[in-house]
Image (cartoon, grey):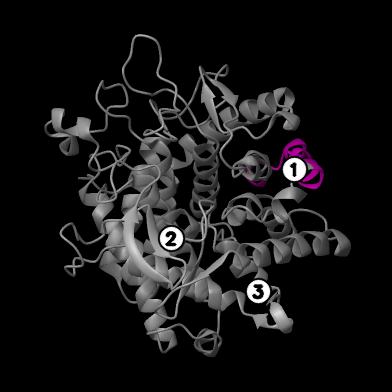
Amino acid sequence: MIDVDHNVKPKDLQPALSRFFELAAGKIRALNARWDPGHGTPVFTVSGAYTSRGWTEWTQGFQFGNAIYQFDATGETEFLEIGRRATVDVMASHVSHIGVHDHGFNNVSTYGNLLRLMAEGRIPQDRWEREFYRLAIKISGAVQASRWTPTADGLGFIHSFNGPHSLFSDTMRTLRVLALAHRFGHTLMGEQDQKISLLRRLLQHAEASARYNVYFGSGRDSYDIRGRVVHESIFNVHNGVYRCPSTQQGYTPFSTWTRGLSWVLCGCAEELEFLATLAPQEIIEAGVADLPDHDAVIARFVETAGATADFFIDNTPSDGVPYWDTAAPGLSSMPGYLDRPADPYNDSEPVDSSAAAICAQGYLRLGRYLSQNGQADAGARYFQTGLTIARTLLAEPYLSTDPGHEGLLLHSIYHQPNGWDHVPAGHKVAHGESCMWGDYHLMELAVYLQRLAADGPYLTFFAV
């Protein structure tokens, strides 16, 4: 169980944040100088060097988003130019990619962050450059929303790259691109010029994810524990009927792959902040089955985020870094593992620091939101949980301090069932490596915390 420090404050992390950005500068420069985009997208490191892994192209925006955030944090224009040039040169294919559910990862991290910096006055105002970024987001949001599977209960979901039967928990964090495209007044045009609301699809997908991928202790099945998250739900595409839980990267359909939970927690918290900027009537007009009004929609997001947040606290070691799955078989040989800090060097099961980085931001945003909306005690608990996790990740053994290692966040895991992650010689378990989404989410977390510590502008994806 996470040992939440109720005294740590964002300002206490300023020395660690300064060190982080100093380390990040060299690593971003080195990877940018070495990497040829023609060789694919960097995914994870092997012996400290980033490599590609052909499965789906979902991490390139994180690579260039790191450079943009480094400029955000330090003002060093070389990183802005790395991110801006790469966005123009290589990101267009991600905007029109019809085969993935990852648009909110690739395109908000690049086009979206550049647009936000312009809105904040951090980069020069240019009307046509701004419209270029906005157009990319509009198209990306519409393409993402077009991957639609209707369900028998009147909802529907953005299906994963596995096909129209597959609802992934990951997609909760990519809904941000639909939110931005809706903010820009865009709609998806369907057959016979049908106008399809991107906000409606965002809300329908979120409700489908809560209904089928998150458990609330209501006796849904024999393994219904409040806050447990299934990676994937399977539907009969002929009639939209739910069939069963599944998983691609977890251990079983009846356990929690911790990164899957992290996407739900962070996505829900972030979308709560976005929804707070909309008029209640706008949400009502979007119309979601069984959620008749604005208050019901907001309550559902809070319920989902709170359940996953509580489950993670209870099922994660004391320092806030989880093992890759809550039922990973090797954990049975590690008695008391939840009562002490995670051990990334153990011989039984790998930890996943990337899940911790994603969750940390979710906790901070959820805590702040609840504190501002009449739930001070819960808000404080979640906010302090986020700070506790962040402090762990910004120090050894998770912070990558070796300038020869291209990663920022050590001890992440990509695909344990497939055995893709690098196991060092003489060891039994993958450790010591980084992944592009882990690096990016630690970077995003660091920029978020830097602004809190300095009382700067609050960081959101929709400040555009």
List x then y, in percent, for residue 126: 86, 60
- Dot 2, how many residues are within 10 Å of its Cα: few (below 14), some (14-19), or many (20+)? many
Please determine whether, in this image, residue 283 is positioned above or below residue 50: below
| Mark 2 → mark 3, Cα distance in angstroms | 20 Å
Q: Is residue 235 magenta?
A: no
Query: As shown in the figure, which amino acid type bears the numbered disc 1?
Result: Leu
Q: Quadrant of the N terminus?
A: top left
Which quadrant would the C terminus be assigned to in this image?
A: bottom right
- Residue 396: image quadrant is top left
Which numbered disc flags the more N-terminal residue, 1 or 3? Answer: 1
Mark 1–mark 3 Cα distance, whole angstroms, equals: 25 Å
Percent from the top left, x then y, of residue 108? Answer: 64, 55
Mark pair 2, 1: CA separation: 26 Å
Q: Residue at x 41, y 72 (%)?
A: 207
Task: Name above or below for residue 408 compared with residue 268.
Answer: above
At label 3, which amino acid type do we have? Answer: Arg
Q: Residue furthest left?
A: 335
10 Å neighbourhood of mark 3: few (<14), some, or many (≥20)?
some
Residues drawn in magenta: 72-89
Q: Earlier in the sequence, mark 2 or mark 1?
A: 1
Q: Which residue is mark 2?
A: 365
Q: Which labelled disc corresponds to residue 80?
A: 1
Q: Secondary structure at mark 3?
A: helix
Is 77 part of what is drawn in magenta?
A: yes
Secondary structure under tag 2 reads helix
Q: Of residues 299 and 319, which is closer to you in this image?
A: 299
Which one is in front in this view, the residue at disc 1 or the one at disc 3? 3
Q: How many marks?
A: 3
Taking the image as shown, residue 153 lies to the left or right of residue 204, namely left
Depth check: give the residue in front, 459 or 274.
Answer: 274
Q: Which residue is mark 3?
A: 183
